[in-house]
Image (cartoon, rainbow, N blue to C red):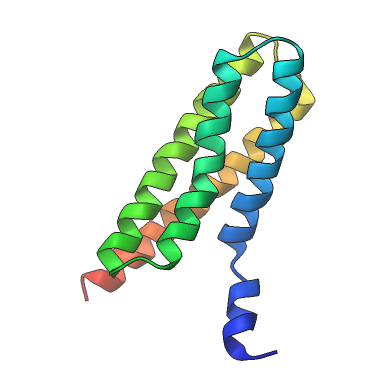
Amino acid sequence: MNEELKMKSKNVLKDKSFTFSIHIVEQYRRLTESKEFVMSKQLLRSGTAIGALIREAEFGQSRADFINKLSIALKEANESCYWLELLHRTHYIGDEYFERLAAYINELISMLVASIKTSKLALNK
């Protein structure tokens, strides 16, 4: 395996955001089966946007563009957290599943914040 391929396979943020998107799509299916369409659609949009923006950032035109895409991904992650909390508090999502998704999104938020900070430091050097 060449070095470039090894680096791509070790992109934890990219992998975790993709896995989170899968969980969100699965949750969306469950919510729409119970006839909840508005909040679930918002969660689907914001929850899957995180990974898409991280993928976009990979090929950013500059470090500033990379940081911008990750910053937007962070906003989408925060919005996803909001929709998850709202769906949980309104009893559309059970405690156990909410805790799992909340832990996942909080980890993504932490990773995005760290990546943005590191990139900003590199940009300012």
Q: Is residue 116 visible?
A: yes
Residue 19 in percent (x, y) is at 68, 49
113 and 66: which is toward the camera: 66
Determine whether 6 is above or below 57 in the image: below
- Say which quadrant the N terminus sits in: bottom right
- Say which quadrant the C terminus sits in: bottom left
In this view, which residue lies farthest toward the bottom?
2
Determine whether 116 is above or below 104 in the image: below
As drawn, is 12 to the left or to the right of 123? right
Residue 15: which quarter of the image?
bottom right
As drawn, is 81 to the left or to the right of 93? left
The residue that appears at 50% across and 45% down in the rendered structure is: 50
The residue that appears at 63% across and 43% down in the rendered structure is: 21
Residue 63 in percent (x, y) is at 29, 68
The residue that appears at 51% across and 54% down in the rendered structure is: 111
Please state the total of marks drawn on the protein image.
Answer: 0
Residue 105 in percent (x, y) is at 58, 40
Determine whether 66 is above or below 102 in the image: below
The residue that appears at 29% across and 64% down in the rendered structure is: 120
72 and 112: which is toward the camera: 72
37 and 47: which is toward the camera: 37
Q: Is residue 93 visible?
A: no
Determine whether 84 is above or below 125 in the image: above
Residue 18 in percent (x, y) is at 63, 51
